[in-house]
Amino acid sequence: MADEKENLQFKAVSDQMKMVKKLSTIKHKIVVMSGKGGVGKTTVAVNLAFALSHRTKKNVGILDADIHGPNVPKMLGMDGVRPDVVENQIIPIYMPLGDDYGIKVMSMAFLIDPDAPVIWRGPLVSGAIEQFVRDVDWGELEYLIIDMPPGTGDEALTIAQKIPGIDGSIIVTTPQEVALLDSRKAVNFSKQLKLPVIGIVENMSGLICPYCGKKIYVFKEGGGEKAAEELEVPFLGKVPLEPKIVEDGDAGIPFLGDIEDSESAKAFMDIVDNVMKNIGK
Ligand SMILES: Nc1ncnc2c1ncn2[C@@H]1O[C@H](COP(=O)(O)OP(=O)(O)OP(=O)(O)O)[C@@H](O)[C@H]1O
Ligand SMILES: [Mg+2]
Ligand SMILES: [Zn+2]
């Protein structure tokens, strides 16, 4: 009995070492998370990866860690794509942005029938994430952006614990008053995992009226900024509500590449600057 337990422990340690070695070709790992759903994590994750790859002219990966609702592929126009497997390694789907750099994507959506509902119990979730780390040929990456499932529950916890060496978390929130509550949950989650908070993004922050150009504060204003102040974590910036962002998301194109001159794209580029600055610290 004791031997068996020791063997299991040994296996766990050696698995963990394999995962660490596997991820050693990745310079920075960032999780994008939130206290609740639908606030724009995937939008932030996809556009952040796009911007970071353009800025650094290097490969950037996105790991869609939302096992139950994987929609990174949809936002990048990779619906229905199936990855190749070479020598037992899954090759992530590649979206070239320049001659020798681009985005590499891995998602549960590539491995399952999209119409079949999947009910993943805890052990299956951690097994799936392990597979994403261990069995995917990521190659050299400047950044790996990990798009988390909504919330701070067991599933998110299991996922974050399974990925060794995460640099820190980006917390996405909305401007409402409850933002403070949601952000606090996310900050505490990061603390619990000893992940530095890279900063808070306030998304859907005011709508630019297409008729008169004035800003309409649909969900009030400043909740994310106030939360950052109160929780003593960096504030990365605000992205306004822009109808084109929804359209681009549905069409599978990063909005940064489409509406470069819009206020939201400019705001997003400031956020990218802040992420790069804060991660170097
Ligand atoms: N700044 C914005 N302006 C307009 N629409 C936005 C903005 N940010 C996100 N959206 C839209 O809101 C919806 C939800 O965004 P997204 O899927 O990124 O959120 P999420 O936090 O990843 O959701 P989930 O919790 O379900 O994973 C999408 O349709 C997206 O296009
Ligand atoms: Mg999402
Ligand atoms: Zn108006």
Image (cartoon, helix red, strand yellow):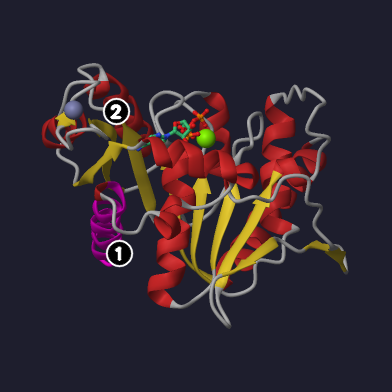
Secondary structure under badge 1? Answer: helix
Q: Is residue 75 magenta?
A: no
Which residue was labeled with disc 2?
Answer: 174
Amino acid type, label 1: Met
| One can see residue 60 in this view | yes
Please, is residue 238 above or below residue 269 in the view? above
In the rendered image, which quarter is residue 6 located in?
top right
**How many numbered marks, from 0 up?**
2
Of 192 and 256, which appears nearest the observer? Answer: 256
Which residue was labeled with disc 1?
Answer: 276
Q: In the rendered structure, which disc, 1 or 2, sits on the residue that comes first in sequence? A: 2
Secondary structure under badge 2? Answer: loop
The reply, left or right, for residue 214 in relation to residue 91 is left
Please, is residue 39 above or below residue 25 in the view? above
The reply, left or right, for residue 11 in relation to residue 270 is right
| Quadrant field for ligand 1 | top left
For the point 66% across and 44% down, the residue is 129
Rendered location of residue 161, percent (x, y): 53, 42
For the point 27% across and 53% down, the residue is 271
The reply, left or right, for residue 33 in relation to residue 104 is left
Q: Which residues are magenta?
A: 264-281
**Direction bottom: furthest residue:** 99
Q: Main secondary structure of the magenta part?
A: helix
Rendered location of residue 247, percent (x, y): 49, 39
Q: Quadrant of the C terminus?
A: bottom left
Q: Quadrant of the N terminus?
A: top right
**Direction front: furthest residue:** 211
For the point 76% across and 58% down, the residue is 135
Estimate how packed mark 1 is, as few (under 14), some (14 to 19) or many (20 or more) residues with alpha carbons within 10 Å. Answer: some
Residue labelled 2 has its Cβ within 8 Å of some atom of ligand 1:
no
